[in-house]
Structures are given as C-alpha cells and as structure tokens.
C-alpha cells in the first residue's frame, strides 16, 4: 500500500486526483504501478487501476498471456464500477484497497461487483488498509482545488 500511496502523491503533484495502484505478481514483486492519468491524458478511462492492469497485462503477455490469475491489485481507493469490472475480467486473485468510496465504490459501498456470484470470477478482498492516509490525500487534494 505504501507504493500505491507514493504513486498517488506523484500524480497529485502533476494535478491528477491522488489515487495510486500497484499490481503484485504471485511472489509479491511489483510488476506494475500507476496513478490516475485522466487529467494528464484526457482519457476518462485512465483510472489508476486500469493503467496498472494494462501494464501488468503487457508484462503477463510476455510470460503466460493476459490473465493475472495469481496477482494482487493494491489501490488507495475502493474501485468504481468500471475498475471493478476490469479487475474481474483480468482475473485478479486479490484486491487490497485503502479508503472506501461512498459515492462510487463498487466493491463494498454501493455494490459488490468483484464478489458477485453471477460472474465467472470472484476476487478476494481486503479493505481499509491505510485508509486514513488514503482518505487524507484525497481530502487535502480536493480542499486545495476548491
């Protein structure tokens, strides 16, 4: 989570919303790291999770294909519906997130996409890891931009 928080700080300094994500391979090695890039790229899908999953899938293609079946995604904020769907489709094994997102969270707050029994894959979830630090980054960022 500390690496994801560092990514969040990095992108905040560039003017993007401070959300960071990392993907760990089965042995715990970071194979992708990213922060939000929506403002920087003008791409509405450039959430930290999506950017990190794209990087990890590119690394996986060189190995075994696109599936990230034994990987862990660590992100500073509860994923939205788009990101939760991408997590399921990437076959991520574990999701660890920091702060809950009561307005858009699709892992616990509004719905639970990643553990929906109707889908073909379910994800193990650990929530609230360094939640205070993750929430503080977001709160401070938005306070400075209002």
Image (cartoon, grey):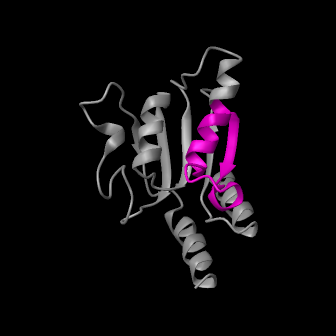
Magenta span contains residue 53: yes
Question: Residue 43: x percent and y percent?
Answer: 61, 52
Q: If the image is split into quadrants, where does the C terminus sit? A: bottom right
Question: Residue 96: x percent and y percent?
Answer: 49, 46
Residue closer to the observer: 123 or 18: 18
Q: Is residue 75 left or right of residue 15?
A: left
Q: Is residue 105 left or right of residue 21?
A: left
The residue at 56%/30% (across/down) is 71
Q: Is residue 143 above or below residue 98?
A: below
The residue at 55%/40% (across/down) is 73
The residue at 36%/49% (across/down) is 107
Task: Indicate the quadrant where residue 13 lies.
Answer: bottom right
Question: Residue 109: x percent and y percent?
Answer: 32, 58
Q: Is residue 41 left or right of residue 128?
A: right
The residue at 50%/29% (across/down) is 90
Q: Is residue 94 above or below residue 97?
A: above
Q: Is residue 99 above or below residue 24?
A: below
Residue closer to the observer: 139 or 45: 45
Residue extending farthest top: 64
Question: Residue 1: x percent and y percent?
Answer: 60, 52
Q: Which residues are magenta?
A: 29-56
Q: Answer yes or no: is residue 100 visible.
A: yes
């Amino acid at each position: 989570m500390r690496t994801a928080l560092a990514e969040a700080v990095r992108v905040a300094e560039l003017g993007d919303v401070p959300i960071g994500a990392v993907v760990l391979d089965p042995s715990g090695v970071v194979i992708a790291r990213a922060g939000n890039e929506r403002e920087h790229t003008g791409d509405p899908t450039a959430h930290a999770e999506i950017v990190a999953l794209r990087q990890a899938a590119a690394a996986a293609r060189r190995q075994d294909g696109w599936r990230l079946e034994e990987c862990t995604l660590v992100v500073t904020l509860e994923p939205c519906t788009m990101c939760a769907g991408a997590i399921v489709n990437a076959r991520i094994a574990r999701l660890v997130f920091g702060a809950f997102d009561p307005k858009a969270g699709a892992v616990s707050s509004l719905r639970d996409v990643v553990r929906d029994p109707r889908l073909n894959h379910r994800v193990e979830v650990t929530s609230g890891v360094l939640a205070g630090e993750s929430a503080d980054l977001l709160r401070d960022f938005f306070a400075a931009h209002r």
